[in-house]
């Protein structure tokens, strides 16, 4: 008897319970349920699968390599050359993800080492007697080393030993704009890799590569995948005019976006866009030229540091005459902000070309304004995966089950004939049956 009762208690392991379904001919509830099902199906197919491609897994960890090359020549009016090539106007050397192309310059020709007056616009360089000029002291933000002599005939400035005459300070001249730079071409070679899918690609087609590159030039509609860009077109795409930017320089971001669907072999091509970085208003642009022409050397070795900003503030009161020449700087947010803004633009460069004349070392010094290009690559790849597909389908089926519960609640608690539906849906046990079941359970436990 005990063995039989124990066997009966284990029978529940082999039992299966199913839900009892009750059909009803209620048009309102039936229509509500079908609308709910169609909504869930539309959401799954339209939004999850077609719009967001929920059947795919994505990889946005893009590994990228960029090689650049600039081509073009320009006639210039300088003392050492009348023709510039890429080796003359591209900084730094070609092949980097960022580069600056010279579009204007200020030339200080025929400098030689010797003694001369420091530029009177350099800070902390005024004097009234020789004792104000400490021998051997380098002029901070200046052009040389003090010799200990005060040159009262030169606006009371200290004499220095350095490259003389000192650098010319003036606003850039539209007459010296390198106008041929508008037709310079920039070639961008981009290699990318999505490590999760072990997929690699390039923005240059493999077939007929040489012939393609010789005949293509980027155009948003005619040739959107050509990796050769005209500099003037790049500037125009940012909403700026070339001559305006070429005068004082500017910074442009070249954005390369890769959106790859690896389930379609041909759908992995770059999309190019261009944006002006640190775009300045006309007023701030003038402030930049004004301040940088006076203070570009001040930030020399301490570019952008808080110490420099503090020094500017401390010396502002002592040099009201200097700031007066930059009256437009008034409410530009302080000198520190203007200088930091100019640093972010990266459109001011300096270099010198050395030569020997009459047995003496000489040089031609250039302050160059140019268009800085920053190439930024980003993107994402997608590929079919069974796991997200199953997860999204299961989520949709769960929502459909929720629709059944909503319709049950409407039938049992909202509709007019809810009592009839309740009796058909629910099976209630009588008191006698309940007590008999409880007694049987107690006997089984005792035995």
Image (spheres, rainbow, N blue to C red):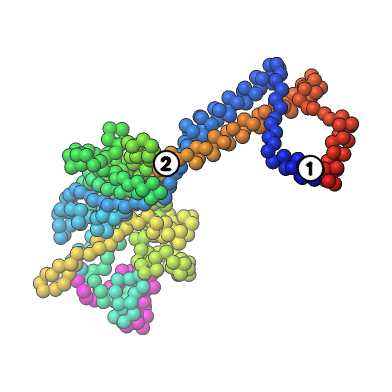
Q: Nearer the viewer, residue 10 or 114?
A: 10
Residue at 71% x, 18% y: name it. 24
Q: Which residues are magenta?
A: 112-135
Task: Give the labeled residue for mark 1.
Answer: 5
Residue at 66% x, 32% y: name it. 402
Task: Give the labeled residue for mark 2.
Answer: 382
Q: Nearer the viewer, residue 424 or 393?
A: 424
Please tell me the numbered disc located at residue 333.
none
Between the residue at mark 1 and the residue at mark 2, the CA separation in whole angstroms equals 60 Å
- Say which of marks 1 and 2 sits in front: 1
* Magenta stretch holds residue 98: no
* Magenta stretch holds residue 114: yes
Label 1 sits on a secondary structure element that is: helix
Residue 173 seen: no
Q: Nearer the viewer, residue 199 or 100?
A: 199
Q: Dot 2, crowdedness within 10 Å: few (<14), some or many (≥20)? A: many
Measured as percent of width and height from the top left, residue 330 is found at 46, 56
Label 2 sits on a secondary structure element that is: strand
Q: Is residue 194 above or below residue 150?
A: above
Left or right of residue 429: residue 44: left
**Taken as a whole, is the magenta stretch helix, strand or loop?**
loop
């Amino acid at each position: 008897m005990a063995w039989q009762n124990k066997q009966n208690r284990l029978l529940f392991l082999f039992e299966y319970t199913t839900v009892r379904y009750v059909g009803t001919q209620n048009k309102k509830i039936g229509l509500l349920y079908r609308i709910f099902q169609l909504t869930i199906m539309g959401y799954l197919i339209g939004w999850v699968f077609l719009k967001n491609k929920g059947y795919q897994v994505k990889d946005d960890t893009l590994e990228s390599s960029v090689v650049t090359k600039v081509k073009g020549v320009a006639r210039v009016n300088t003392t050492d050359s009348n023709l510039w090539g890429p080796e003359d106007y591209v900084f730094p050397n070609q092949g980097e993800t960022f580069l600056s192309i010279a579009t204007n310059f200020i030339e200080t020709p025929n400098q030689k080492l010797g003694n001369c007056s420091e530029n009177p616009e350099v800070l902390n360089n005024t004097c009234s007697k020789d004792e104000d000029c400490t021998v051997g002291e380098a002029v901070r933000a200046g052009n040389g080393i003090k010799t200990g002599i005060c040159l009262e005939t030169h606006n009371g400035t200290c004499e220095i030993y350095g490259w003389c005459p000192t650098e010319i300070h003036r606003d850039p001249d539209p007459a010296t704009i390198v106008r041929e730079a508008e037709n310079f071409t920039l070639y961008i070679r981009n290699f990318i890799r999505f490590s999760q899918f072990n997929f690699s690609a390039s923005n240059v087609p493999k077939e007929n590569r040489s012939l393609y590159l010789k005949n293509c030039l980027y155009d948003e509609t005619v040739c959107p995948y050509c990796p050769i860009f005209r500099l003037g077109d790049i500037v125009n795409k940012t909403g700026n005019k070339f001559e305006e930017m070429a005068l004082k320089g500017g910074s442009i971001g070249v954005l390369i976006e890769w959106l790859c669907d690896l389930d379609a072999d041909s759908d992995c091509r770059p999309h190019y866009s261009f944006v002006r970085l640190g775009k300045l208003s006309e007023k701030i642009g003038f402030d930049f030229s004004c301040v940088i022409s006076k203070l570009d050397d001040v930030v020399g070795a301490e570019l952008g540091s808080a110490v420099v900003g503090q020094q500017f503030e401390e010396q502002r009161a002592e040099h009201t005459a200097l700031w007066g020449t930059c009256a437009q700087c008034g409410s530009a947010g302080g000198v520190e902000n203007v200088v930091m803004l100019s640093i972010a633009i990266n459109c001011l460069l300096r270099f010198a070309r050395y030569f020997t004349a009459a047995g003496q070392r000489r040089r031609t010094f250039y302050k160059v304004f140019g268009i800085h290009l920053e190439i930024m690559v980003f993107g994402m790849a997608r590929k079919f995966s069974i796991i997200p597909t199953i997860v999204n389908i299961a989520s949709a089926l769960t929502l459909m089950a929720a629709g059944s519960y909503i319709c049950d609640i409407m039938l049992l608690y909202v509709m007019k004939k809810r009592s009839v539906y309740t009796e058909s849906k629910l099976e209630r046990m009588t008191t006698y049956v309940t007590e008999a079941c409880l007694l049987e359970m107690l006997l089984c436990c005792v035995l």
